[in-house]
Amino acid sequence: MKNWVKRAIRTFIQAAVGYAIVALPAIDWQDTSALRGTLIGLGVSAIAAGISAAMNYIDDTKM
């Protein structure tokens, strides 16, 4: 697997775990908006990983 892909996956995991640790205990699971908020948080984690992948890919191609 490419080095930049590994770093992107690691970034996603770091962002998702950090979000989960902070947000999950405070969620009211009976409320449907809570599920929406959780999914938005995971989406933000995925965006962070995508940005990380793009930045790392550019660095890897310069080497």
Image (cartoon, grey):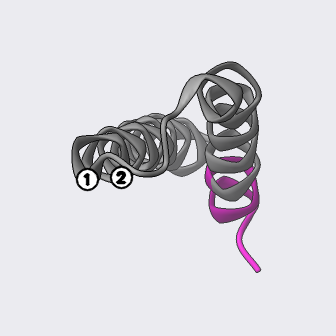
Q: Which mark, by number, is residue 20?
A: none
Tell me the amino acid under the disc marked 2. Leu
At mark 1, the secondary structure is helix
Q: Residues within 10 Å of mark 1 (few under 14, many from 20)?
A: few
- Name the foreground residue: 19 vs 45: 19
Q: Distance from label 2 to label 1 (Cα)? A: 5 Å
Q: Which mark, by number, is residue 32?
A: 1
What is the magenta range? 1-8
Q: Which residue is at a point 35% across and 41% down the rendered structure image?
A: 34
Mark 2 vs mark 1, foreground winner is: 1
Q: Residue furthest front?
A: 30
- Name the foreground residue: 28 vs 58: 28
Residue annotated with mark 2: 35
Q: Main secondary structure of the magenta part?
A: helix
**x%, y% of residue 25?**
71, 28
Q: Which residue is at a point 42% across and 44% down the rendered structure image?
A: 38
Please check the rendered image and state whether residue 21 is part of the magenta-colored stretch, yes or no: no
- Name the foreground residue: 44 vs 24: 24
- Name the foreground residue: 36 vs 15: 36
Q: Which residue is at a point 31% across and 38% down the rendered structure image?
A: 37
Please check the rendered image and state whether residue 5 is part of the magenta-colored stretch, yes or no: yes
**x%, y% of residue 4?**
64, 54
Quadrant into which the N terminus falls: bottom right
Quadrant into which the C terminus falls: top right
Position of residue 57 in the picture relative to residue 30 (left or right): right
Q: How many marks?
A: 2
Query: Where 11 sits versus 39, above or below?
Result: above
User: Marks 2 and 1: CB-CB under 8 Å?
Assistant: yes
Tell me the amino acid under the disc marked 1. Thr
Position of residue 41 in the picture relative to residue 5 (left or right): left
At mark 2, the secondary structure is helix
**x%, y% of residue 24?**
64, 35
